[in-house]
Amino acid sequence: MRQVLLRLDRWITGLALNGACLLLATVCVLGLWQVVARFVLSQPSTWTEEALRRLLIWCVMLGVVAAFRHGALVSVDLMLRLSRGWFRHLVRHVITWTSLAFLAVIAWFGIDLAYRVRFQTFAAMDDISMAWAYAALPVGALLSMVAVIGQHLDARNTELDNAQ
């Protein structure tokens, strides 16, 4: 079961990180287009600013999956550095369960929020539901939960190990 979870975690983390990188590249291209359209062509784009905001939300929520998996988020790292034996084991469990509870709250309310705004559309893009932007919250939280479990089963504290 552990190997299946770690394999699923590796696949999800890789997919989320590649998606976040692709979205970041898209944001850069759209930002460049917005500057060119506004200052070079004197025809400001009406939709790029709104698209940039929504894509950045998705980018962050997908990027946080990899951050959770690699132990790069702020945690109680001082306690982890100073603790040994059973206390370190306890601190890791507390961090894991607290992270899972926090992500569960984000997923729960994110689903509710996406459901509530499903009939609203973007101001500059009338055909796209606002729920697509808010769906980043539950999707990112659920994927992050897998990463948190993977981090607990096979700790990769690259940030903690490199801290001084």
Image (spheres, grey):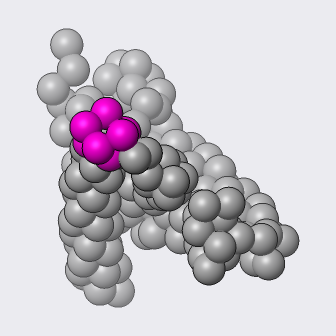
Q: Is residue 87 above or below residue 26?
A: above
Asked if residue 149 is among those painted magenta in the image, a careful observer would answer no
Q: Is residue 9 above or below residue 124?
A: below
Residue 112, located in which quarter of the rendered image?
Answer: bottom right
Residue 126, located in which quarter of the rendered image?
Answer: bottom right
Q: Is residue 20 above or below residue 80?
A: below
Residue nearest the observer in this picture, 31 or 39: 39
**Along the horizontal axis of the image, is 152 left or right of 98?**
left
| Image position, residue 87 (x, y; %) | 46, 34
Residue nearest the observer in this picture, 122 or 131: 122
Q: Give the magenta part as a residue range.
A: 36-42
Residue depicted at x 35% and y 86%? 1
Residue nearest the observer in this picture, 81 or 130: 130
| Image position, residue 6 (x, y; %) | 27, 74
**Along the horizontal axis of the image, is 122 left or right of 21?**
right
Does residue 89 appear in this view?
Answer: no
Quadrant (top left, top right, bottom left, bottom right) of the C terminus? top left
| Image position, residue 121 (x, y; %) | 71, 70
Residue with the most extreme left position:
162
What secondary structure is the magenta-colored segment mainly? helix
Residue depicted at x 32% and y 23%? 81
**Along the horizontal axis of the image, is 54 left or right of 151?**
right
| Image position, residue 89 (x, y; %) | 42, 44
Residue depicted at x 31% and y 81%? 8
